Amino acid sequence: MPGRPAPRRRTVLSAAALTPVAGLGLTACSPDDDGAAPARPTAPVDLGADGEVAKGAATLFPDGNVVVSRAENGSLKAFSTVCTHAGCPIEKLEGAKLVCPCHGSEFDARTGEVLHAPATAPLIELPVEVKQGRIIASPGA
């Protein structure tokens, strides 16, 4: 248009940065009701032989979304491996650290405590016992 100065590059880039992009929303970090893994088993889960979890170690059971650790005294603890931040199933165990693939949250596999945000809530602890030589995790409360 005559008499109107052309917009400067900075003006165009600033406006573009402030313009919402279709399809992007604030739900990206929310669990999808259709795709989110259940936070706890719905029935008792047979995770395997009692000997699969060594003293002082943790073992990930990705098919059941459970991690089990065994203390030096032989006691077991189990936690859901569904991230408390966005409901993503965690399938990576590095020593005693669980790493969520979605946003990088990290949890202690022995205690369920958050080691690295964005998650702020610990993993859900599950009842676990050995029955007839098999490790069984239950839904609990």
Image (tube, grey):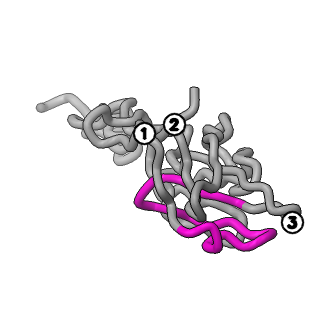
Residue 59 drawn in magenta? yes
Q: Nearer the viewer, residue 76 or 84?
A: 76
Q: Nearer the viewer, residue 90 or 12?
A: 90
Decide which of tag 1 and tag 3 comes sooner along the chain.
1
Residue at mark 1 to residue at mark 2: CA–CA distance: 6 Å
Looking at numbered disc 2 in the image, what kind of residue is underneath it? Pro
Residue 99, position in %: x, y?
Answer: 59, 60
Disc 3 marks a residue whose amino acid type is Glu
Q: Are marks 1 and 2 in contact (CB under 8 Å)?
A: yes
Q: Circle 2 sits in a helix, a strand or a loop, which is it? A: loop
Q: Report whether residue 14 is seen.
A: no
Q: Amino acid at mark 1?
A: Ala
Q: Which residue is mark 1?
A: 43
Kindly identify which numbered label has been placed on residue 139.
2
Q: Quadrant of residue 32?
A: top left
* Among the 4 quarters of the image, the one containing residue 140: top right
Q: Residue furthest right?
A: 73
Residue drawn at x 47%, y 56% as measured from the top left: 46
Looking at the rendered image, the quarter that the N terminus falls into is top left
Q: Where does label 3 land, which residue? A: 72
Highlighted range, magenta? 49-69
Q: Residue at x 86, y 66 (%)?
A: 72
- Residue 92 in the image: above or below residue 113: below
